[in-house]
Amino acid sequence: MDERTSVQSFSTINETFIRPSTFYISGISNIPHAKYYYVFLCFVYVMTILGNSFIMGTIYLARSLHTAKYIAIFNLALSDLCASTALIPKLLDMFLFERQYISYGECLANMFFVFVFMAQESLSLLALSYDRLIAICFPLRYHEIVTKEAMTMIIGVMWLFTVSVFALLVSLITRLSFCRSTTVESHFCDHGPVYKLACNDYSVNNLMAMVCVAILIFIPLTFITLSYFGIGLALLRMSHETERTKAMKTCTAHLMLVAIGYLPISGVYIATYIAPIDANLRIFNTAMTQTIPPMLNPIIYTLKTEEVMQSIKVLYKRTKVKYFSK
């Protein structure tokens, strides 16, 4: 009797648990000439590939850039390239060619890869702020503390951490039942718009979402801010104006990346938690904060970092000599 009751209960649970075969990604709706926006994103993607590939190639080829700092910059460029690749091609396929239905498994994979690479962008900026803090506050011990081995280990831990966190985040979606709408009001399989479609309790998913935003956006931003307070105090203690100016120049590119990378995305999350915002506005802002910084990061590092510019000139001269010597 107990066995029959348990089987009946199990079958009832199975009947009420619904896992959809597909989700429908709504994207920006009721906006005239929206295709021009997606064409613009195509241009952004091409520029992102070229810029980040160029930075990665320069770091790989220039021996002078084989340092701990440029291991972190290489990781940032790789994360930018992967984040854009995880997001933009699928987005263009869905909205330029009107293939907005995405399978359940594809949706979870899309969610996982977009968030993992976005988190890596954030943590790479944190690693670079650590590098700048040690370089300016402890210049005599910099090469002893920030070694290539130490930076490689830090980046390895970052990858392991983000993959673990987002594997858990995505796996928690599988416990949800979707018995109503399967229309995701976003430009990709975004975690929040997906779990809020569930019929059963999604409080764990909501808690996990807040933890991830805190750990991977607001806590890194807080540490970066504190590191720059320390850098500011160290700069004030410097007696020579030339030393202070030189030290400040080394931070300029990183500060610009932090402003571009953190301020828009943190603004979107804060606005979403304070009050509901128009779906189109939220989607547009989120898409811009996910796609524009990866395109701008290599440009900023190329133009604002003397070491990179000098290495590019050396590589250009070396290539020129080889070409004409043939």
Image (cartoon, rainbow, N blue to C red):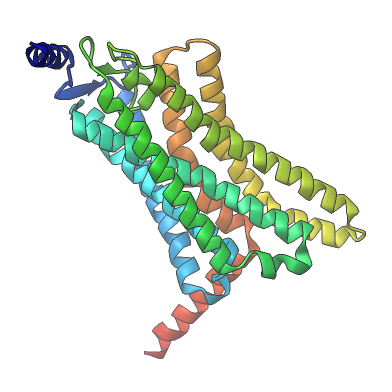
Q: Is residue 240 left or right of residue 91?
A: right
Q: Position of residue 6 (x, y in %)?
A: 13, 15
Q: Position of residue 162 (x, y in %)?
A: 43, 44
Q: Is residue 301 left or right of residue 133?
A: left
| Quarter of the image where one finds residue 88 | top left
Query: Could you say which is closer to the camera, residue 24 or residue 45?
Result: 24
Query: Could you say which is closer to the camera, residue 320 or residue 10?
Result: 10
Q: Residue furthest front?
A: 1
| Quarter of the image where one finds residue 190 | top left
Residue at x 60%, y 70% (from the top left corner): 310
Q: Position of residue 66 (x, y in %)?
A: 54, 71
Query: Could you say which is closer to the camera, residue 209 or residue 113?
Result: 209
Can residue 243 be seen?
A: yes
Q: Position of residue 31 (x, y in %)?
A: 34, 16
Q: Residue furthest bottom?
A: 325
Q: Is residue 268 above or below residue 148?
A: above
Q: Residue furthest right?
A: 239
| Quarter of the image where one finds residue 114 | top left
Q: Is residue 4 left or right of residue 282?
A: left
Q: Quadrant of the N terminus?
A: top left
Q: Quadrant of the C terminus?
A: bottom left
Query: Could you say which is closer to the camera, residue 124 or residue 1?
Result: 1
Residue at x 26%, y 27% (from the top left corner): 174
Figure label count: 0
Can residue 41 be seen?
A: no
